[in-house]
Image: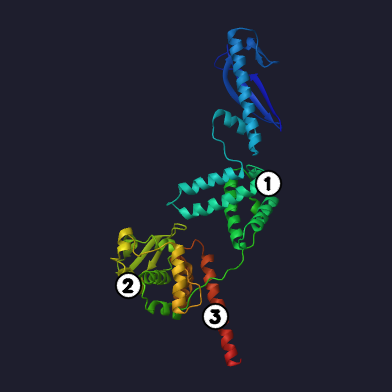
Amino acid sequence: MRLTINFLLKNSRKNSANSPIYARLTINEVRTELSTKIHVGPGLWDKKTQRCIGKTMIAKSINQQLQQIEIRLRDIFSHFIFLDVYFDVNDIKQEFLGVKKKPKGLLEVFDYYLETIEKGIGKGYAYRTLKHYRVTYKKVQLYIESLKRNDYPVQKVNYEFLNGFDTFLKDNYPISQNTVWNYHKHVRRVLNLAVSLEHITINPYNRFKVKLEPTHREFITLKELAKIEKKKLKVVRLEAIRDAFVFACYTGLSYADISQLSEQHLHLDDNNKEWIIINRSKNNNRCMIPLFSNAKAIIEKYKEFPESMLKGRLLPILSNQRMNAYLKELADICGIEKELTMHVARHTFATTVTLSNGVPIETVSKILGHTSLKTTQIYAKVIANKIASDMDVLQEKLNL
């Protein structure tokens, strides 16, 4: 790659005595021009040397300024070469003029995407979304570094690059195929942004496909839920954890949303029916959840609980990690062999509490705050598989 710089005089319509000097930049036959903001009389300009004629102070001053401009332009060119990012003559021009250029490296576009998420926290984005994308950014950065680069031209991100990233993840980290899929999902969205910014015309993920493996969504039965509810517990902390789990089973709220639940989320409609109305922390989707008597009783139970009152929350909630540790203990005490987590509680609401009792899938999807009905259909598939399995057992018993 070679940068050619030429200085040329242009005719001035406003001032026939002095004409503006422009710098013409050319790389690979692509060129652009920028004004040096220097004017000189046509008679003092040497078109061949591209400098002022004579040894006057004015001529020397103009020639020195032109020399400084050329040095500055070549410094910018060398800096872009050092960064090992894609650039063209317009990038050099914008850098020289102090105009913020559009990002062209993959990490630059990713940075821009992270800025967008950060500015949108509380306005459609959650902080944990930013956290997840930062993890993906680090993985992409490490992959690019393994290629001996500081950044990678977004225009050159192709099937080979994405396949290399896929291999890099699988070879260097003990992660599942679905976690790999999730990293790719983030990069795909960053490249969608690159398309929107007109850095690329086609997202390379249109050709590169990543397989998502089906997962088993654990849930508990009504019998198991009743067993947990009725269990007499001697430890106050464990009882509070149990109640939070049961509350999630009857509301479908995630750990993140329950931990933020306060009085402002409780509403009474014109028919005196009580609702929980909250925007999901994950996607900011609005959820309207009918407050069942079981869930309401739990709220009333902790209304004057010191920890709840101190934090201004409806329930006393620990960190998700500690909650799940206590839930493991609860499962042992109740004789339940399934691994209990707050996710299991949400899945239980979707399957055992609602869909299994005939609540339309569209209604369940709205209550859960799903962006797509396809997500809710996963639970419906789980129920269908369970019914088929139960019928197989029945068939064996009846010897049909």
Q: Secondary structure at mark 3?
A: helix
Position in image of residue 300 (x %, y %): 30, 69
Cα–Cα gap, marks 3 and 2: 32 Å
* In-image side of 29 versus 325 (left or right): right
Which comes before the other along the chain, label 3 or label 1? 1
The residue that disc 3 covers is 387
> In the rendered view of the protein, which quadrant contains the C terminus?
bottom right
Task: Report how far apart the C-alphas of labels 3 and 1 lie in the structure.
Answer: 51 Å
Q: The disc labelled 3 sits on which kind of residue?
A: Ile
Q: Which residue is mark 2?
A: 297
Residue at 65% across, 31% down? 78
Element type at mark 1? loop
- Colour logic: rainbow
Q: Is residue 77 above or below residue 333?
A: above
Label whose residue precedes the other's in the sequence (1 or 2): 1
Count how many numbered circles sit on residues in the image. Answer: 3
Which mark, residue 161? Answer: none
- Give the vertical position of 182 relative to 100 (above or below): below
Residue 368: image x %, image y %?
45, 66
SS category of the residue bearing label 2? helix
Q: Which residue is mark 1?
A: 147
* Closer mark to the observer between disc 3 and disc 2: 2
Rendered-image quadrant of the N terminus: top right
Q: Residues within 10 Å of mark 2 (few under 14, many from 20)?
A: some
Residue closest to the eye, 103 or 358 = 103
* Callout 1 crowding tier (Cα within 10 Å): few <14, some 14–19, many ≥20: few
Q: Nearer the viewer, mark 1 or mark 2?
A: 1
Q: Residues within 10 Å of mark 3 (few under 14, many from 20)?
A: few
